[in-house]
Image: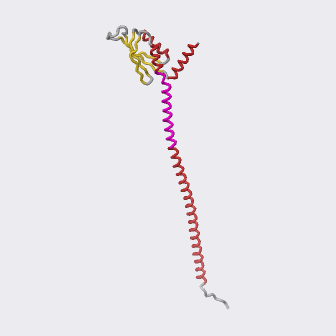
Amino acid sequence: MRKINLLPWREELRHQAQRNFLIMLVLAALIAAGCVFAVNRYFEAQIGNQNDRNAYLRTEITKLDRQIARIERLDETRSRLLERKRVIEDLQANRTLMVRLFDQLVRTVPTGIRLLNARQQDDEITLRGTSQSNARVSTYLRNLEAAGVLHDPRLRIIEAETDDTDSTMPYMFEVSATVAPPETVAENESQDGTEAGE
């Protein structure tokens, strides 16, 4: 005789398929959650490492900023000291220049010229005086140029005085010239000394 299976095998097969599907779904969800967790942990570790690097860089930048500020202060101090040194060197170089200048002013004044005043502003000197004649003023200008202490002497004013305070010196003149740098004066003096020795 034939056997007839009266058990609901199709329904059981369907339940089995549903169970398998649910198991696969749970496994897929667990695997996805595991992947998300692993990726999350990886990125958290990367962010943590980057934050550590950033903190290190901030610390180093702060140190460098302090060093830069210190270097800037040292540079300012150095600039001030160099400026002081330059001023002292200029004073040292110009120390004897005034003595030489007045010495040459006295030596270059020819007979018939009288200096009334001398005024210096920066490197420009202005000499005022009286003269017996225009020729005496020309001689004085040549003498100033030859002395080497003053460069480019220029006659600014020459005029006959109208008041007769001093009839022997009837001409008033004003001469301006540039004071030679100390190095030039020293060179001129050394050349004069060499020529005198020959």
Viewer-closest of 167 and 95: 95
Viewer-closest of 6 and 97: 97
Instruction: Tell me if residue 80 is in the magenta stretch.
Output: yes
The residue sitting at 66% across, 89% down in the picture is 3
Viewer-closest of 62 and 42: 62
Q: From the viewer's perspective, is 132 left or right of 188?
A: left
> Can you see residue 111?
yes
> Can you see residue 156?
no
The residue sitting at 48% across, 24% down in the picture is 95
Q: In the image, is residue 159 above or below residue 55? A: above
Report the number of discs. 0
Q: Which residues make up the magenta segment?
A: 70-98
Q: From the viewer's perspective, is 2 left or right of 87?
A: right
Residue 123 position within the rendered picture, expressed as x and y whole percent measured from the top left: 45, 23
> Which residue is farthest right?
1
Q: Main secondary structure of the magenta part?
A: helix
Instruction: Tell me if residue 87 is in the magenta stretch.
Output: yes
Q: Quadrant of the C terminus?
A: top right
Q: Quadrant of the N terminus?
A: bottom right
Viewer-closest of 105 and 11: 105
The residue sitting at 40% across, 21% down in the picture is 119
